[in-house]
Amino acid sequence: MTGLQVGNDASLIVLVDASSETERRLVRSALTEAGDGPATVLPLRGDALAGPLADAGPDTVVTAVRVAWVARRPAGHEEAGRRRGRWSAAVPSLRRRPPGPLQRRTLRRDPDRARVVLAEPATLGELTGRWEGTGQLCDFVAHQAALALDRAERGVVGERVKVPRQVVEAIEASPEFRRELTALAGRLECPEDEVHARALAALDGLVAAVDPAAVEVFTGVFRPLHSRAWDVQADTEGLERLRELNRRHSLVFLPSHRSYVDPLVLADVLAQHDFPRNHVLGGDNLRFWPVGPLAKRAGIVFIRRSFGDDQVYKLAVREYFAFLLSKRFNLEWYMEGGRSRTGKLRPPRHGLLRYVADAVERGRVDDVLLVPVSITYDQLREVSLMAAEQGGAAKRGEGLSWLATYAREQVSTPLGTVHVAFAEPLSLATALRAGADATDPDSRRLTLQKVAFQVAVGINSVTPATATALVTLALLGVRDRALTLAQVRRVVEPLLTFLDERELPHSGAALTTFRGTRSVLATLAAQGVVTVFDGGEEPVHAIERGQHLVAAFYRNSAIHHFVDRAIAELVLLRDPVDRWDEAMRLRDQLKFEFFFPERDAFRERIGAELERLHPEWETADGREVLCQAPLLVAHRVLRSFVDAQLVVAERLAARDPRTPLVEADFLAECGGVAQQMLLQGRLHGPESLSRELFTTALQLAGNLDLVDPGREDVARRRQEWAAQVRDVVGRVAVIDELDAASRREIVGVEP
């Protein structure tokens, strides 16, 4: 401990935060070595400070000391870190701060583990100036000393130990909260005491502790759910950039959501790179005993899925967010509102962004950086259950028995790699300033929608096309046929070239060799996604019966990289004079499935793809251009989406326009008719029989004003839309035929 000028001077007060006799002895020794000893040494408690502060002058210096315990790194630490997680890790770790009775023994074995740290000193005058007059000055000084000690301790043990303290008390004492509470009570015409009690109850339910011991137990219990299933590849360059930004700003991590273990994977990655633990927002459905109480102490903020019109709860959320962000704590939530059932990003929900924007606009924090995060898995066991839900199966409720089953399945066999990547952060303050329009009351909502959209685009930009995604993209593109190993490679090779030429992220290097491709196929076969027939001249591979939605999940995680090219191919099958208009029509038809930029930027991107296909594409014969193309993707990328739209469009066209539509019944009808259409050969494959795809197609129909009951005009427009969708489906089929003709050795038949 250095930096403490000790002498017989009554103007110096040292507050001691020590909870055991061993720690008190270490502090006394450190103070003795620093000098003759300060005039006043007190325990770090508000009640102990009341008298001395009353007698002290404004020049009195106040500081504090604490014993920081450095984590023990046992022999073989690095090798142990490379091994997969073990259930024995569930035992609470004593590597950080040993219990009081064990501290003396710990120091005999490893005396360097204990370090006495000194808080940055402040004069009583400075502290009084920061005090806002609420509560007792002695309690305020004790709280400030504890915060200063936390900062000093993090300088020794790292940022991971950054924890919030006395959150509810601090929010309750803040003038902003009291003003908001009074104003809300007036608007609700309720007694202020009643609103105050409801707000405190809401805060008690929201506020999560970040207890290091609970974090270690939580991590130890749940880490095997991912560490035994996947190796983790993280974007270390992105993490370095974020750590530097986190020194000045709070970060809000907004990851993609494909698995229950997403928060565990991200927490592990951030902890390994010495980030403070995020406050992770989770739904109340995961608040079951005994997970809920432990998770709440480990930084999980359980929040309602819907706030409704509960203004008191909204106030509690707004003040809690503002408190955390003003103290530079990081947040994390999943904007899709649930795990993706199709493999691609769901439309983001921007509701919670309002409360972050409030903190920026009200000056509680200068800026907040939004961090798009991609979490992508080579394989996921839970995909099978999600695929079953798309076929109409009921979702199993979360609970203890569900968790036990999930855990057993997760730790059974390895599943490859999980890829974690970070896109360029977005400044929320900059976005709010750019979107501000005092004349438009909807400008703020539209700005936040745009920000959420930009986050989704950022996630997609760093999401790699995995080897699994590329192989399933190849196998799903040939209906009812199996491919040899060489044929799979012939489909995949131009896909890899496409990604490399555009410098798009992928993890498909293994597919450049027969051995690597065979390994990916074998892994998919082991999980029951791919079937292999090896009773002939050579093995052939196909999607296993009943596994098309699972395969589509993997494929869909990468298809956003190919959507522009797919649209360009469809555009070329229209008359030259109509091609730009057709590009915009396709953008509108697919806008509920994919994230497109503004129209000018979209036009530029599609133009670039068309230029790659043919420099004179505006006048060239589109069919001839496509026949000469080294790669055609529209049938592989868009077929299941436009097939699902075809089902919805035709069912709407067949309805009496005056009959109200009940969504659940209509979606069930679509599922049954789609099965018939598949059996009749009118749909390409079972991957289009997805309740989620039918739902987004119905949302598109609603956007076109084709859902609400009407008269003949609605019937006519429904028929027109069905004809437009049939036209697109037909052009997709043409591209399929052209691809088969140019690669007949792949599908094994003459064109």
Image (cartoon, rainbow, N blue to C red):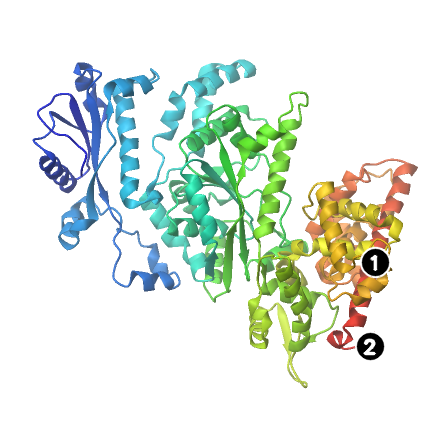
Residue type at the position of mark 1: Arg
Picture layout, residue 656 above or below residue 630: above
Residue lying farthest bottom? 537
Residue designated by label 1: 731
Q: Residues within 10 Å of mark 1 (few under 14, many from 20)?
A: many
On the image, the x and y values in percent for residue 214 come to 34, 45
Looking at the rendered image, the quarter that the N terminus falls into is top left
Residue plotted at (73% across, 74% down)? 746
| For residue 395, side relative to residue 253 (left or right) | right
Residue lying farthest front? 615
| For residue 726, side relative to residue 640 (left or right) | right
User: How many labels sit on residues?
Assistant: 2
Q: Nearer the viewer, residue 23 or 293?
A: 23
Q: Nearer the viewer, residue 676 or 234?
A: 234
Residue designated by label 2: 750
| For residue 249, side relative to residue 112 (left or right) | right
Residue type at the position of mark 2: Glu
Q: Identify the mark at residue 705; answer none if there is no mark.
A: none
On the image, the x and y values in percent for residue 149 come to 26, 34
Picture layout, residue 196 above or below residue 507: above
On the image, the x and y values in percent for residue 630 come to 74, 67
Picture layout, residue 3 above or below residue 554: above
The answer for how far apart the CA atoms under marks 2 and 1 are is 21 Å
Q: Is residue 11 at least partly visible in the picture?
A: yes
Looking at the rendered image, the quarter that the C terminus falls into is bottom right
Q: Nearer the viewer, residue 27 or 184?
A: 27
Counting residues from the N terminus, which is met first, the one under dot 2 or under dot 1? 1
Picture layout, residue 137 above or below residue 87: above
